[in-house]
Image (cartoon, rainbow, N blue to C red):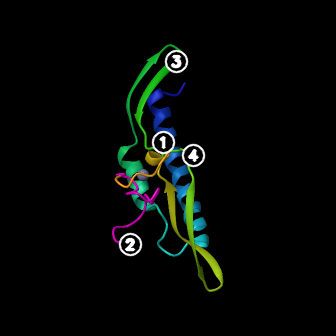
Amino acid sequence: MQAVDDFMQEFLVAERELRRRFAELEKEMWARFAVPNMHPWDLAEVQKKFDDFTMVESFKEAGEQATVIATAVRVSQWVTRARYTLRQSTGAWQISCIEYACKLCENLGKVRPDCPVCHGAGWFSPYAKENG
Ligand SMILES: [Zn+2]
């Protein structure tokens, strides 16, 4: 029987590899559909975050069961509406901006001008660069 700690380390290595592959595929996908550098995530940064934070904190083995506590980096998975801005480049469409419906305003049922998330737009871009 493999030790719990070894198993978890192996899992984290496999998960890291999965993320790396996913990031590569994602990069290819965005390169095809979006303007250069519009890609919302800095893949290297995401990978670094994953490497820096993902680790086994503790594990407890009791008979045939074990409990492992690990720090995990998760991509949030909420359902929302997205607004895509497209532009044409050499006869093809490219996505130049993606915004998401402001959950804060949506939950209130109206767009508030003083909303700290969308500032009254009803939409926000989590990836927008400052002044850009
Ligand atoms: Zn809002």
Q: Is residue 125 magenta?
A: yes
- Residue drawn at x 56%, y 57% is 82
Residue holding disc 3: 65
What secondary structure is the stretch in magenta mostly built from? loop
Could you say which is closer to the camera, residue 89 or residue 60? 89
Q: Residue furthest bottom?
A: 90
Which callout, 4 or 3, points to the residue nearer the camera? Answer: 4
Q: Is residue 33 magenta?
A: no
Q: Secondary structure at mark 2?
A: loop
Q: Residue 23, labelled with which disc?
A: none
Residue holding disc 2: 132
Which callout, 4 or 1, points to the residue nearer the camera? Answer: 1
Residue holding disc 1: 107
Which callout, 1 or 3, points to the residue nearer the camera? Answer: 1
The residue segment tinted magenta is 115-132
Q: Amino acid at mark 2?
A: Gly
Could you say which is closer to the camera, residue 105 or residue 86? 105
Could you say which is closer to the camera, residue 69 or residue 2? 69
Mark positioned earlier in the residue sequence (4 or 3): 3
Q: Amino acid at mark 3?
A: Gln
**Do labels 2 and 4 touch, CB within 8 Å?**
no
Q: Amino acid at mark 1?
A: Asn
